[in-house]
Image (cartoon, rainbow, N blue to C red):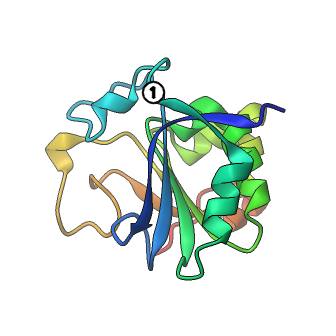
Amino acid sequence: MKNEIRVAGVVKNSVVDGPGIRYVVFGQGCSLNCKDCHNPHTHDFNGGELRDIYRIAQEIKSDPLLDGVTFSGGEPFAQTREFAALAALLDGYNIICYTGHTFEELYADSEARVLLDNVDVLIDGKYEGDSAGFNLRFKGSRNQRTIDAKESVKCGKPIEIAL
């Protein structure tokens, strides 16, 4: 396992990327090219910087105010093993993961399941600028779903929840 993850950046105290105060890791690299993407600077797989996952985990654990951790991007599932390794170091933290893929696509992919098995909430679906809204709680467009990842993996189908 690599100890490094390529990130576009981090936000140490976000209140817009999930409930409570969250540490957000923005992965670097995405090939989905969602129209009107909010983070186009995260698409280049050679951009950003390499960060040690143990240092990121240590930084998260040193902040007593955090309610959880959010993985965003870019596309976290473009670095499945790296994000899964980071999630494994964060046992006890609520982990939300944004993805442009659907739960069904990820569930069918054994490689993607490595990360899917390590998150609590999955917000899935490509961002669609035509169906964007400011009143969508922690989502960018109406097509995206907020899914209980743990229960959905157990059942083999997406179980939507409200945050």
Picture coordinates of residue 74, whole percent (x, y) = 44, 35
How many marks overall?
A: 1
Q: Is residue 102 above or below residue 68?
A: above
Left or right for 93, reference 34: right
Give the position of the N terminus as an image quadrant.
top right
Answer few, some or many: residues within 10 Å of disc 1's Cα (few below 14, many 20 plus, some between 14 and 19): many
Point out the residue furthest to the right here. 1
Q: Is residue 62 above or below residue 48?
A: below
Q: Is residue 31 above or below residue 12?
A: above
The local secondary structure at tag 1 comes to loop
Q: Nearer the viewer, residue 40 or 56?
A: 56
Residue for point 19% across, 52% down: 132
Q: Nearer the viewer, residue 52 or 78?
A: 52
Left or right for 101, reference 57: left
Residue for point 50% across, 63% down: 23
Q: To which residue does mark 1 refer?
A: 30
Give the position of the C terminus as an image quadrant.
bottom left
Residue for point 33% across, 67% down: 16
| Residue 81 appears anywhere in the view | yes
Amino acid type shown at disc 1:
Cys
Residue 126 image-quadrant placement: top left
| Residue 108 appears anywhere in the view | no
Q: Nearer the viewer, residue 115 or 44?
A: 44
Q: Nearer the viewer, residue 18 or 89?
A: 89
Picture coordinates of residue 91, whole percent (x, y) = 77, 67
Q: Is residue 56 above or below residue 149?
A: above
Left or right for 154, reference 38: right
